[in-house]
Image (cartoon, helix red, strand yellow):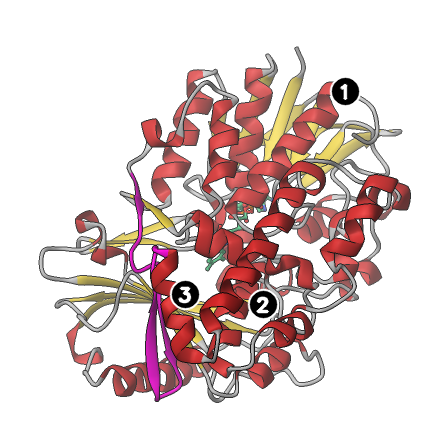
Amino acid sequence: MKDVIVVGSGFGGLAQAALLAKDGHKVRVFEKNEQPGGRASVYSEKGYTFDMGPSWYLMPDVFERYFQGFGKRPSELFDLVRLDPSYRIFFGDQKQVDISSELEANYALFDTLEEGGGDKLRTYLDESREKYDVAIKELLYRDYNKLTDFLDRRLLAQGRKLHLFENLDSFVNKHFTSDEAKKIVEYSVGFLGGSPKNTPSFYHIMSHIDFNLGVWYPRGGMREIAAKMVELCEDMGVEFRYNEPVTRLEFEGRRVKGVVTPQGSYSADIVVMNADYAHSELELVDPKHRSYSERYWEKRVLAPSAMVAYLGVNRKVEQLVHHNLFLDEDWANGFEAIFDRNNHKWPDTPSYYVNVPSRTDPTAAPDGCDTLFVLIPLSPGLEDTPELREAFYDRIMGDLERKLGTDIRSSIEVKRIFALNDFKERYNAYEGTALGLSHTLGQTALFRPVHRSKKADNLYYTGHYCHPGIGVPMVLISSQIVRDLIAKGTKGA
Ligand SMILES: Cc1cc2nc3c(=O)[nH]c(=O)nc-3n(C[C@H](O)[C@H](O)[C@H](O)COP(=O)(O)OP(=O)(O)OC[C@H]3O[C@@H](n4cnc5c(N)ncnc54)[C@H](O)[C@@H]3O)c2cc1C
């Protein structure tokens, strides 16, 4: 039994604490904020409740596998609803389509978008399912230390099939011709913090996740998952210390001795960092104990930041379903602009996403009202001022109202805006990134920051910066990898 400190109570930290407590370790979690969940924090005002971050429950198989480790099923812990439609897409001013939970309806939809569209989607999803199976069996649940781990013979054999060296955009162009069909199978790169051009085509597994595995919602919100994980941890004796940021890690040779907070110093046999990786390294660790230099971080392709408006609307906005995507006609350039480090600006006509949890969940808003979450991806590192936010908010809301043909701003009784500076302040997010590191080829698997420190044998990292990457299911996997590393007590899987 070891004394373990987990720094951060995002999904990565919660998953880690539960796994290590189950293995018999004594676990303490230090969290800088007042509540658990990290990016999945909760904000409530005047009867409106907002999940501040994740809202799509994807990859239900990964949640099943995680909770199975505790002898539980997600459906016993929270009430899971499969959304139908899965989501609605608005294409510019012209057209809107619903993606159904029924495959046949989606094939029929694709037939209306282009000649043979339904059959093309069938083929595309078959390939996507095949790659997803490889990913789950061979790629996601393992650690990588050296090139040969990534390119072992089995994986090399699969590698050709995985189209690792082609980008998603080029891959999709070989399958579909219409602008709409392409956008439908490409939009999900947003979940990976990338663009169709900088994301390997392998990630078209997202379409299997989306169309075949489905889009789900845990009634009560994503916060229900965090709450249930905290319960699980507490049942196994995990101690949570909120409002207690770690300000320094202390070392002795190749070992981390413990952590320092404003309240005191705490020793540990093992420390797992779930706090922002770049922040942990650059601000909590002295240079000689860092796995990566400052320059390393400067050269990473960061996933987008965002501006999110949390809006309590005192009526129903009937034109919206649970998930709504507003895709700009010029979205390709919009994507590229987000990743263009030399051209940082607040975009003129961005694509954006509107989540309405009250459509499925009466507890999210007072009777007859709607809870809206409007998210617009932005370049990390942008200047962020109240004036820039307000002007941008007005532009986006004007666009939304025009597209829906209804005034919303006059019905708003709760409004909170959260943007780059808030990501930095609340989560210590490097450059205000909302999602961490993009999934470019150079930042996939072996090329993501290590789970186990290169400089201290008992210091580990979990969360969205590490393999397998961004998203709640992914960070659950990241923590399972770290748990296995700790259990083995050796480098590598
Ligand atoms: C707006 C938004 C929407 C998203 N939508 C989805 C979605 O629909 N579906 C999905 O699956 N994923 C979504 N994601 C991604 C997903 O939320 C993240 O990938 C995941 O939650 C990251 O978890 P984590 O544990 O790695 O990091 P975090 O959630 O950031 O947790 C890190 C924790 O460390 C704490 N911390 C930081 N510094 C310190 C310190 N010095 N001391 C102590 N504690 C510290 C932070 O406060 C935080 O609680 C979304 C993210 C955002 C921001």
Label drawn at residue 264: none
Bounds of the magenta segment: 80-102
* Residue 100 lies within the magenta run: yes
Q: Quadrant of the N terminus?
A: top right
**Residue ID for mark 1:** 488
Which of these two is toward me, 453 or 180? Answer: 180
Mark 1 sits near ligand 1, with its Cβ under 8 Å away: no
Q: Is residue 292 left or right of residue 204?
A: right
* Residue 238 lies within the magenta run: no
Looking at the rendered structure, the kind of residue marked 1 is Lys
Is label 3 in a helix, a strand or a loop? helix
**Residue ID for mark 2:** 304
Is label 2 in a helix, a strand or a loop? loop
Q: Residue at x 65, y 17 (%)?
A: 3
- Along the polypeptide, which appears first: circle 1 or circle 2? 2
Measured from the top left, where is residue 8 in percent x and y? Answer: 56, 39
**Residue ID for mark 3:** 107
